[in-house]
Image (cartoon, rainbow, N blue to C red):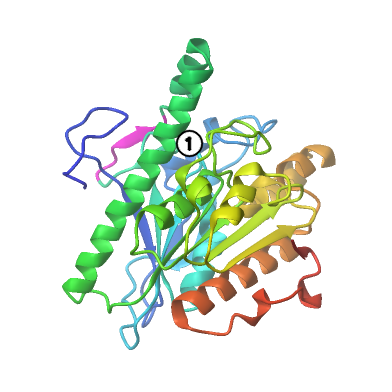
Amino acid sequence: MDRSRRDPWTAAPVRELMVDVRYPARTVAGHGRAPQMTAREAAAFDRLNNFAGLSAGRVDWAATRTFAHTGAPLDRRAAHPVVLYSPGVVDPRSLGTTLTDDLASRGHVVIAIDHPYDVSAVEFPGGRVALSRLPQEFEKAQQAGPEAVTALLKKTAAVRVADARFVLDVVRRAFDTHRLRRAPIGMFGQSAGGFAALQTLHDDERLAAAANLDGVLAYVQDDHDEGGLSTVAAQGVDRPVLLMGSEGNDRTNVPSWRELWRHSGGWRRDLTLRGSRHATYTDATTLLPQVAAHLDVPGRTLEEWVGTVPTHRAVAAQRAYLAAFFDRWLRGGDGALLDAPSPRYSEVAFM
């Protein structure tokens, strides 16, 4: 609960967030598997998601269990680098579970952030649900004209960065009170969450490194539009940055990525996952092929959702490169996978 600011979407006197914290456990005995979404969150996600052509009422999104165990004790034998995660617009924090679970299994403390009234739904303790206001806000902005749409994009990004910086405050207090052993902090996200990760890196020196999974860094409605640059794109950063784009998105044709690259002085890498689409960088790449098989979804529709790269290859590549990035810049590992193309991950192109 951030008492320093009003909620920007409701004018409530405080801004409340929900997060998941994933971490290496000392033991999981007696602790059940965590659901991916609560029943109320799943119901809202069923009604509002980014998968055009998937009608509501056909998928039980609450049925999925993750590989995390609720309430298991933290393994305190070592300091664990901290990684923040921000999802795409409308997506819940839980749609990045494939990657957050993996990073936690490699020894990180991973904090996945929900952005209330942006995400499809956030359920707070006690059962209160905050539903997304973005569809109504976007409709109003479209009616008002292009300047209103740009203002809404700026507001959405600014709220996400403020949320991330508040979580950094909480992590710092955990370090100061020894609830967590002090360690470097990184951040990553998909789409608008990737934008938030890099903008937070620009705005807050407490982040050591950030990764952007297919997120435009400008206030535009098409990744390939010129103009509308964020300050991170226009000014660059001096700390490590990883860009991972869907096929057709790299610094040669995404203007905001080009400008980030041109203005940055720190280490940076630009990778493309061949055969991927925007949602490939979420749990959609694992879930939707299974959904499509059960519901007889046309192959063309599935390709529009998650591309043509096979699920196991897409997941393996994302996990490997993200882990190598944070290993190098939060742990001092060699991260050698980042230095040159690898035959093990032939789908990944170095730009």
Q: Nearer the viewer, residue 123 or 274?
A: 274
Which x, y percent locates residue 117? 38, 34
Is residue 127 highlighted in magenta? yes
Q: Nearer the viewer, residue 222 or 21?
A: 222
Quadrant where the C terminus is found in the figure:
bottom right
Q: Is residue 48 visible?
A: yes
Q: Nearer the viewer, residue 94 or 324?
A: 324
**What residue does disc 1 label?**
43
Residue lying furthest top: 143
Is residue 26 highlighted in magenta? no
Which x, y percent locates residue 101? 50, 67
Which x, y percent locates residue 123? 34, 42
Q: Which residues are magenta?
A: 126-132
Is residue 305 shown above or below 202?
above
Name the side, left or right, on which 202 lies relative to 277: left
Element at badge 1?
Answer: helix
Q: Residue at x 30, y 46 (%)?
A: 17
Which x, y percent locates residue 45? 51, 37
Q: Residue at x 63, y 35 (%)?
A: 58
Q: Residue at x 29, y 44 (%)?
A: 124
Q: Nearer the viewer, residue 199 or 235?
A: 235
Disc 1 marks a residue whose amino acid type is Ala
Name the side, left or right, on which 103 lies relative to 21: right
Q: Is residue 298 visible?
A: no
Is residue 240 shown above or below 255?
below
Name the side, left or right, on which 350 lies relative to 146: right
Q: Residue at x 37, y 65 (%)?
A: 70
